[in-house]
Amino acid sequence: MDTVNVRADALKQANPDQTAPIPADLLTASGSGLDPDISPEAALWQAKRVAAARHVTEEALRKLIADQTQGRMLGILGEPRVNVLKLNMTLDAQWPMS
């Protein structure tokens, strides 16, 4: 529980304008801690901060997240997800950090 509280505090500090509840996958980690994917909700929760850092509109970033969202496997297995590495590579190509 201590780890979750530390992560929550760090997320709130990094995203001070965000008032929505923090998605669970931003507060927890898998057994390996190396999952390449986050939920679309987790990506969207951070969109305002990332858009500001990339000097792009939040709407454009939200569209990119939607385009990068992968559905359930075979339509029924797993949850929708966003591959963070692929998303970051696309962000770097379209809106590099200055």
Image (tube, grey):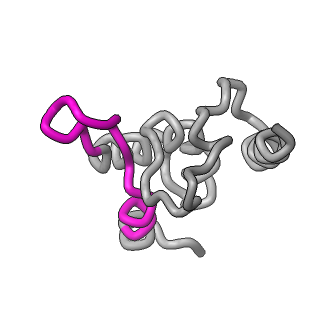
Write the residue at 54% across / 44% down.
Answer: 47
Q: Nearer the viewer, residue 73 or 41?
A: 73
- Does 12 sit above or below residue 94? above
Q: Along the horizontal axis of the image, is 70 left or right of 24? A: left
Q: Quadrant of the N terminus?
A: top right
Q: Is residue 61 left or right of residue 24?
A: left
Q: Position of residue 13 (x, y in %)?
A: 82, 45
- Range of the magenta residues? 70-89
**Residue at the farthest top position:** 20
Residue lying at the far left in this picture: please name it: 74
Q: Is residue 57 above or below residue 72?
A: below
Q: Residue at x 53, y 40 (%)?
A: 42
Residue 92 among magenta residues: no
State left or right for residue 37 relative to residue 28: left
Q: Position of residue 54 (x, y in %)?
A: 55, 61
Q: Is residue 60 above or below residue 20?
A: below
Answer above or below: position of 35 versus 8: below
Measuring from the top left, give residue 2's x and y in whole percent.
86, 42
User: Which of the pair 98/88 is nearer the observer?
Assistant: 88
Q: Residue at x 40, y 46 (%)?
A: 60
